[in-house]
Image (tube, rainbow, N blue to C red):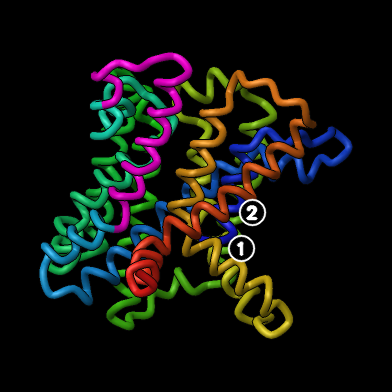
Amino acid sequence: MGLAILWILFFHSEIYVPDFMLPVKFIKLTGYAGVDIFFLLSGFGVACSLFKDATKKEFFIKRFVRVIPVFWMVLSLYFVIEYIRYGVGFRDVLFSFVGLDFILFGDLKFWFIPAICICYLFTPIFNSLLLKGNTKYFSIILILVLLVLLVFFAVLAPHLLIFITRVPIFLFGIYIGYNFSRNRNVKFLNSYLVNAIILFVSSVSLVCVLIYTNSSFRWEIGLWWYPTIFLAYPLCFFTGWFLDKNNKLFSYPTMLLRVAGRLSLELYLIHNLFLYSTKGINIDAPETLMQFIYIVLSFILAWLANNRIELKKLIRHHL
């Protein structure tokens, strides 16, 4: 998760990468794949959480407490800034706070939050079906249903493809978490050969998509995201394996990545707050420098937001 959020921050930022640094430029261009990793790991996490939690009520309370307060806090700051600069309407504020700005109109500023919350709503149902049914046949039916949904949204609501294309990877994360929490060994998940083949094919497909298609066509049918659906798990598999094997060698970087992973939600929201709130403001400083400053400030504020409960306790203790 730490690597995924750093990848996303790099992708969202307007840091200029010159053409002679082609590998770095490609990494920046494909940073949206970090979102697929988040959907995968979120599915994994909620499946493990459902296995531990006594009730579904506990599950939803935990998700609400983790996501909504910091989301509303960042939105409040965003709209205060927007009101000072341009003025805002009540409908815009209301729709943003309940996620309808993305669902109805395709506003992408903080789209991940309403998208992942919709996934959370259906997680207990999917988990219950896994508990009751044959996972093999259920997976086949699920794939067919998702294909129908993709066609439906591609025609009637293409602005939601950025979310709908990620639903399969979220459900796959639940499937992995379901088996992991019950200590079940799924051979293809642990196969180095299978993961290497999927990684190679999906990577080549992604390169071909980026080279041989234009961005407007990719947006129209969701072609941006199809290769990264398959790319997410092999990336997690091999990155996790590498970090595990070299844990002592990379102990400090791994520790920093864990911090970034723990702050990932706050980092995503606060960094977007900086990017959208500073648009159109002329600052007498190099753009790349300002982008790095936004990322550093995002880490500081994310840490403060993530530790708000501990900070309140500390303040009360001193008072």
Q: Nearer the viewer, residue 304 or 37?
A: 304
The answer for how far apart the CA atoms under marks 1 and 2 are is 6 Å
Drawn side of residue 54 relative to residue 83, left or right: left
The residue that label 2 is drawn on is 200
Q: Which residue is drawn at 65% across and 82% down?
A: 247
- Residue 176 visible in the snapshot: no
Q: Would you place residue 29 above or below residue 169 in this image? A: above
Q: Residue at x 22, y 77 (%)?
A: 52
Segment colored magenta: 66-93
Proximity of marks 1 and 2: CB atoms separated by less than 8 Å: yes
Q: Quadrant of the C terminus?
A: bottom left
Q: Residue at x 39, y 72 (%)?
A: 318
Q: Give x and y (percent) for residue 300.
A: 56, 55
Q: Give x and y (percent) for residue 214.
A: 62, 20
Quarter occupied by residue 199: bottom right
Q: Which of 281 and 17 is in front in this view?
A: 281
Q: Would you place residue 277 above or below residue 45 in this image? A: above
Q: Give x and y (percent) for residue 82.
A: 43, 23
Q: Would you place residue 203 above or below residue 273 in this image? A: below
Identify the secondary structure beneath mark 1. helix
The amino acid marked with disc number 2 is: Phe
Determine if the magenta segment contains residue 73.
yes
Q: Would you place residue 124 above or below residue 8 in this image? A: below
Q: Residues within 10 Å of mark 1 (few under 14, many from 20)?
A: some
Q: Which residue is drawn at 74% across and 31% down?
A: 287
Drawn side of residue 290 relative to residue 51, left or right: right
The residue that label 1 is drawn on is 196
Determine if the magenta segment contains residue 236.
no
